[in-house]
Amino acid sequence: MKFAIHNSSWLDRPDPAEAFEAAKAKAQWAEDHGFAWFSVMDHTIQIPRVGAPDEPVLEGWTVLAGLAAVTGRIRLATLATAVGYRNPAHLAKIAASVDLISRGRLTLGIGAGFFEDEYRQYGWEFPPQPATRIRQMEEAVQLILKMWTEPRTTFHGRYFRVEDAILEPKPVQKPRPPVMIAGGGEQMTLRAVARLADACNTVGGEPAEVKHKLDVLRRHCDTVGRDYDTIEKTHVQGWLLARDDAAVAAKRERLAARGPLPGFVGTVSEAIDRIGQYQDAGVELLINGDRNDVETRELFVSDVMPHFV
């Protein structure tokens, strides 16, 4: 089991002008303390399950480029870029540039998109049918992979097209950076993972639910002739830890003003047990959707991660 930190909130410091400095410090700390991955959200406004829509939010790929320049080992990703936010050929160029800046540490996290309010605020078209957005995502990934690997790309899809397009320089990683598709839709999204992705990402859910999703993914792999073991299985949710029940109760009370606390809230021993269940379900990379709680991060390093070496 590997461990990761996902920067889901930009409220580590009271001054919004310090948001990047806070993310940089967190990413560098994660790199120095054994975490394998650091990701940022790619949203223009905060999503409902994390915070209020008017919270300060930085642009994800801009931040990722900055982090690529000030870290040296940790893998960097968006979790996840919605297909509707950028022309995929442009996204291929952005991602290739971040891979170059990071010297080959990028994972492209991509999803079909879900946050309709954000689409409307920023003038992006929001197809109401999830199936349409998933098909757009699949086509975008196909185009991106071609842009990363072909000298010139001509692509005429249902949703996207390019003509004799040049992308130079190519990404540093060979044959190209890995692609992680986020989401657990059993009929279409996990089938897209089996066909196109190097990693999947499930969001929340009990270990039994995650195991079920991964069993579905395995069946899709069998159908398309894909080796299930070549796909990295990742899982993200919020984790809030304390050493004992009294400390957990105090933390709940202190953080209640921020709103609901989705995800896991409990003691270190309970967390170790739950993480073991996720590992048994097939999860290989556990991503902490960080709630700006320093103690939780430190307890992961001192008490949790050593159990899964």
Image (cartoon, rainbow, N blue to C red):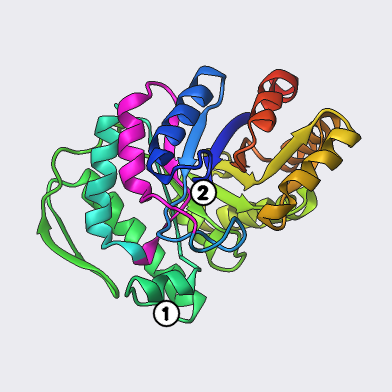
Q: Which residues are magenta?
A: 55-84
The residue wearing badge 1 is: 127
Mark 2 crowd level (few <14, some 14–19, many ≥20, 10 Å Cα)? some
In the figure, is residue 297 to the left or right of 122? Answer: right
The residue wearing badge 2 is: 226
Taking 205 as reference, is 188 above or below it?
A: below
Task: Give the tally of numbered discs.
Answer: 2
In primary-sequence order, the first of circles 2 and 1 is 1
- Residue 235 appears in which quarter of the rendering? top right
Residue sitting at the far right: 245
Q: Which amino acid does the dot numbered 1 rest on?
A: Pro
Residue at 13% across, 46% down: 151
Residue 297 visible, this orientation: yes
Q: Residue 31: percent from the left, percent from the top?
A: 49, 22
Q: Secondary structure at mark 1?
A: loop
The dot on residue 90 is none
- Residue 260 appears in which quarter of the rendering? bottom right
The quarter of the image holding the C terminus is top right
In the figure, is residue 62 to the left or right of 78? Answer: left
Mark 1 crowd level (few <14, some 14–19, many ≥20, 10 Å Cα)? some
Residue 175 visible, this orientation: no
Q: Residue 187: percent from the left, percent from the top?
A: 59, 68
Residue at 50% across, 59% down: 46
In the figure, is residue 63 to the left or right of 251? Answer: left
Taking 302 as reference, is 11 above or below it?
A: below
Between the C-alphas of marks 2 and 1, the distance is: 30 Å
